Structure formats: C-alpha cells, structure tokens
Amino acid sequence: MQNPIEQQVEQVIQYRKQLIAVETKCSQFQGDVPAQVWLELVEISRRLEQAEEQIRQACHKLAGEVNQLRGEIMTQLSDYNHWRDQIRQVEEQFLLYIVRPGYQLKLAVRQRERLEQAYQRIYEGIQREGYPNQEELAADIHRVLAHDAAASEVQEDVPDETLEQEESLYDTLINVTVDDVEEAISREELVKEFKRIVIPKIHPDTSNTSNEVFINVYESYKKGDPLLMEAYIAEYRGEIAPEKEADVLESFDQINNLWKRYQRLLIRLARRFEGLKKDLTQQELENPEKIKPKFADQRQEILSRIQDEAEKILYWRGKIEGLLKDNLGDS
C-alpha cells in the first residue's frame, strides 16, 4: 500500500501525462480549440498545480527532518570524536604497558621453542648417527647458537611496523563493520563527494578551519573510513532546502534519498559509538589515568613470564652446548 506522499507523487505524474495529452489535442485544432477542450486543459492544469504544491510542502517538511537528522549526526560525531580522543590516551598506555612487553614475550617464547626443537633434532641426529663426522655436528651446533644469539639481539628493539599489527585495542574499536561496507555508498562516489564538499571547507588554503580540526577530519579520509567520511559530508554539506526553480518531483527524490541516507548513517554511527565504549568503562574513558594500574599489573605479569622464558632459553642453550662438549670434548 502506498503512503500519502507516494500517492501524491503518482498523482503529479498522472496529471502531467494527462496535460501532455490535452496539449497535444489542442495543437491539432490549429488555434480553433473547442471550449470543452480548453476547460479540460484548465482543469488539469489546476489539479496539477495543486498536486505539485502538496509535493512542494512535503519537500519543505522533509528537508526539516533531514536537517534535524543532520544535527543528530553532528552530535553523535562530536561525542564519538571526544571518546575516541580518550581512547587514544588509553591506547598510548596500552602500547607502553601491554603491547611492547607482550611482543617481547612472543619473541622469547618463539626463541625458546626454536632452541628446544633444535636440541631434540640434534640429539636425535646424534643417536641415529646422522652426522657423518664431528665437524658437521659442530657446525650445526654453532649455527644454532649463533642464530639464537642474533635472535636475542633482535628482541632488544621492537619495530614500529610490527607493533602496528599488535595494537588491537584501537583498531578493533574503529574497524569498519560488514554492515558499514554493505550499507555505505560506493567508495569511489564517497571519495568524490568528500573531496567536493568537505575538503574545501577544512583545508587551510581554502578555509579558516583550525589545523586541529583539519587533521581530525582529514584522518577519516586517509584511513579510508567510509562511515566517518559520510558523517563529515553530512556535517559540511550544511542544512538543505528545496530549490525554488527545481522540478518538485526531482527535488522530492533528492531530499527523500538524503533522508533515507541520513537515517542509515545515524544508525551506523550509533552502532560504531557503542562499539567504541563497550570495552572500557565510562569512568576509565573519562579519566584514562585510572586504567594505568590495571595495565601496570598486566605488564608485571608479562615481564614475569618473559623472565621465565629467559631462564628456559638459558637452560636449552646450556643443553645444546652440553651436546657439543659431550660429543666433541673441549674442542
């Protein structure tokens, strides 16, 4: 069943078809148009004008709703950015207390596992007499120990590009969902729209926008975040109003499509916002310092496990060196 506005749109379409038909009929009389035909033309024109006026009023009402949705989107976007800034402060502590020592632990575990496996391989090789001579046995053992020493040196520095893969807290919170991708307009169209509407209003060369705002907004473009890009497009598009000279049906379609788009955008933005907050309490986000003790306890646990792994590494190095001494003497 059609809603009232859809019925009005259909009426306008039908009246326009009827008007074209009557105008075509009038043209056939070559100026001597019968009065009945003129009356028909006037009546259809009157009805069409009334129907178009109803659509015009609907456009104004719908434009008001679109502007209200835009206001809600801007509020949600502002709240999201505020909480995201808080998350970034938490992220810095997360990186310091958890990610870096956690990566060191991962390397230590791998190093210990390699030594343990190497010992088992060499020991079994000796038992099966798999080494043709002592020189090859010694070369294999020295190679394992040299590789282990190099691995120990690598652990001293944690490359930033590796840590980027480990920083799961912030990335998890801002990752685009399948629903975001599915519901968003095409990326190519979105990028064009962002460049056309947003960039001129935030770029230092074309606006008075502060550098802080520019960096924050432009970040969504650099990261290719379709949800935030679309939210900024809504913000910087500004309020809308029906164009006086535009065809009422075209104007209605444009405003109605924007209304539907803003409705979906607001829902997805709210979903993203809830995802941002769910992993941390409001108290922790409002005061990131309060989460430091929790991270410090976790860091201490990680450091303790690193120490355990370090002792195991020394143990297995000693076992491998023992194979060298037992089978080759002190040479």
Image (cartoon, grey):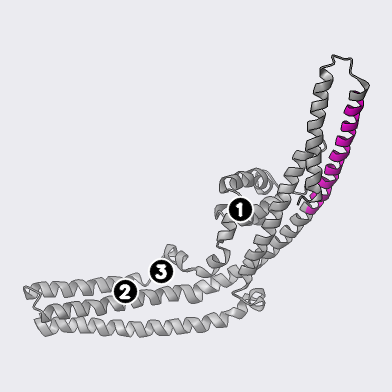
Residue 115 point in image, percent of width and height: 26, 78
Label 1: which residue? Answer: 184
Point out which mark residue 134 bears: none
Label 3: which residue? Answer: 158
Q: What stretch is highlighted in magenta?
A: 38-65
Residue that appears at 58% across and 52% down: 221
Quadrant location of residue 179?
A: bottom right
Label 2: which residue? Answer: 152
Mark 2 or mark 1, whichever is nearer to me:
1
Camera-side residue: 265 or 277? Answer: 265
Q: How far apart are marks 1 and 3 (CA)?
A: 37 Å
Relative to 240, 81 lies left or right: left
Residue that appears at 8% across and 76% down: 134
Identity, as a three-letter code, of the amino acid under mark 2? Ser
Residue that appears at 84% across and 42% down: 56
Identity, as a three-letter code, of the amino acid under mark 3? Val
Q: Dot 3 lies on which element?
A: loop
Vertical placement of 4 versus 292: above or below?
Answer: above
Identity, as a three-letter code, of the amino acid under mark 1? Ala
Quadrant location of residue 193?
A: top right
Vertical placement of 20 versus 173: above or below?
Answer: above
Magenta portion: prevailing SS class: helix
